[in-house]
Image: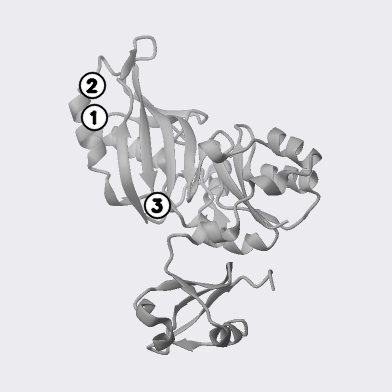
């Protein structure tokens, strides 16, 4: 089996849990996910099967879209609704929608984030959540993130019992973005401690929620020997890259991993990454050579069809 399975991860499961279950359902070992989702977050989790696992590293870097809820009035250790409360400030009434929207727009573009203590970022060989679970604090490295869209999608609702205000949002972002931290930082700009009270990933790379299947649905398809009918071929992952169709002469060089001069690629010489096809099959990704100007070298080979 070879391709990308658009899985809908349900809440309460880790990404590794999904891979473990799929290995049993599909009776195959070579399976990999394309970027972790927290157990409390549901949503799109593309799964690479067989030779398509070579695409996992590229899919992890692709943009993501989320829908969720922000609550201001208290913050937590985990920056979501499942941590212990660490700061509180009563909200005495509804905030101005105009001020909320104005502050949300200030996050669009390249921003700097400090990863949550409960995250998988490594510092000095240990993941931050390991320090957090041991009650240790450590200086966290700042990271860049790109936010393409961040907007409010509902009217803010005031809870007079908890003295909090909540509203839903949609965000489109680049790799490595911590949406939990986005919620916390927005609250800070509005003058309140805050947390992300709910989150769903609605799109990952080329896959949207409408295309996804749950584990139960995959299990049923496996019993009917129909799983391959829902897989995206690896070629679909790289649709947006410049494509070059190799002739027989260049194919002989590419399949042996040769470094190739830019002049061989017509008008694609300025492209950082090129997808090479032989016939209908993606066979390689080539990138600019770091030491030989005017040449490209293999970045990843996909030769399983030959």
In which quarter of the view is residue 166 placed?
A: top left
Quick one: 49 or 81, which is closer to the camera?
Answer: 49
For label 1, the crowd category at 10 Å Cα-Cα, with few meaning under 14, some 14 to 19 and many 20 or more, is some
Residue 174: assigned label: 3
Q: Nearer the viewer, residue 119 or 39?
A: 39
- Which residue is depicted at the point 25% across and 17% down? 94
Q: Earlier in the sequence, mark 2 or mark 1?
A: 2
Q: Residue at x 69, y 42 (%)?
A: 17
Graded by Cα atoms within 10 Å as few (under 14), some (14 to 19) or many (20 or more), the crowding at tag 3 reads some
Image coloring type: one colour
* Residue located 39% across and 73% down the image: 272
| Residue identified by numbered label 2 | 95
Lateral position of residue 216 relative to residue 60, left or right: right
User: x and y percent of residue 253 in the render?
Assistant: 57, 87
Q: Are marks 3 and 1 in contact (CB under 8 Å)?
A: no
The answer to which of marks 3 and 1 sits earlier in the sequence is: 1
Vertical placement of 11 versus 3: above or below?
above
Location of residue 11 with respect to 257 vertically, above or below = above
Looking at the image, tell me whether mark 3 or mark 2 is earlier in sequence order.
2
Q: CA distance from mark 3 to mark 2?
A: 29 Å
- Image quarter (top left, top right, bottom left or bottom right) of the C terminus: bottom right
Q: Give coordinates of residue 63: x percent, y percent.
A: 43, 51
Does residue 142 lie above or below 106 as drawn? below
Q: Tag 3's secondary structure? A: loop
In the displayed structure, would residue 89 be above or below residue 160?
A: below
**Quadrant of the rendered image containing residue 39:** top right
Are the two marked residues, 2 and 1, in contact with CB atoms closer than 8 angstroms?
yes
Q: Which residue is mark 1?
A: 100
The x, y position of residue 163, in whole percent, is 34, 15
């Amino acid at each position: 089996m070879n391709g990308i399975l658009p899985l809908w991860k349900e809440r309460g499961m880790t990404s590794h849990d999904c891979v473990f279950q799929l290995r049993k359902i599909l009776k195959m070992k070579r399976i990999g996910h394309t970027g972790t989702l927290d157990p409390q977050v549901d949503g799109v989790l593309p799964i690479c099967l067989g030779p398509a696992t070579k695409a996992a590293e590229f899919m992890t870097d692709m943009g993501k879209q989320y829908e969720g809820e922000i609550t201001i009035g208290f913050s937590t250790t985990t920056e979501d609704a499942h941590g212990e409360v660490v700061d509180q400030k009563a909200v005495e009434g509804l905030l101005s929608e105009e001020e909320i929207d104005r502050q949300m727009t200030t996050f669009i573009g390249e921003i700097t984030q400090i990863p949550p203590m409960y995250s998988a970022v490594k510092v000095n060989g240990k993941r931050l959540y390991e320090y957090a679970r041991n009650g240790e604090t450590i200086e966290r490295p700042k990271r860049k993130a790109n936010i393409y869209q961040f907007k409010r999608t509902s009217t803010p609702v005031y809870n007079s019992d908890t003295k909090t205000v909540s509203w839903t949002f949609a965000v489109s972002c680049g790799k490595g973005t911590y949406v939990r931290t986005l919620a916390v930082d927005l609250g800070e700009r509005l003058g309140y401690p805050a947390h992300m009270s709910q989150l769903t990933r609605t799109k990952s790379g080329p896959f949207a929620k409408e295309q996804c299947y749950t584990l139960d649905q995959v299990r049923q398809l496996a019993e009917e020997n129909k799983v391959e009918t829902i897989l995206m071929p690896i070629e679909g992952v790289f649709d947006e890259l410049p494509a070059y169709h190799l002739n027989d002469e260049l194919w002989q060089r590419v399949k042996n991993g040769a470094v190739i001069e830019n002049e061989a690629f017509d008008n694609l010489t300025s492209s950082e990454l090129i997808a090479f096809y032989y016939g209908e099959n993606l066979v390689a990704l080539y990138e600019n050579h770091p030491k030989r100007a005017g040449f490209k070298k293999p970045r990843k080979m996909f030769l399983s069809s030959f």
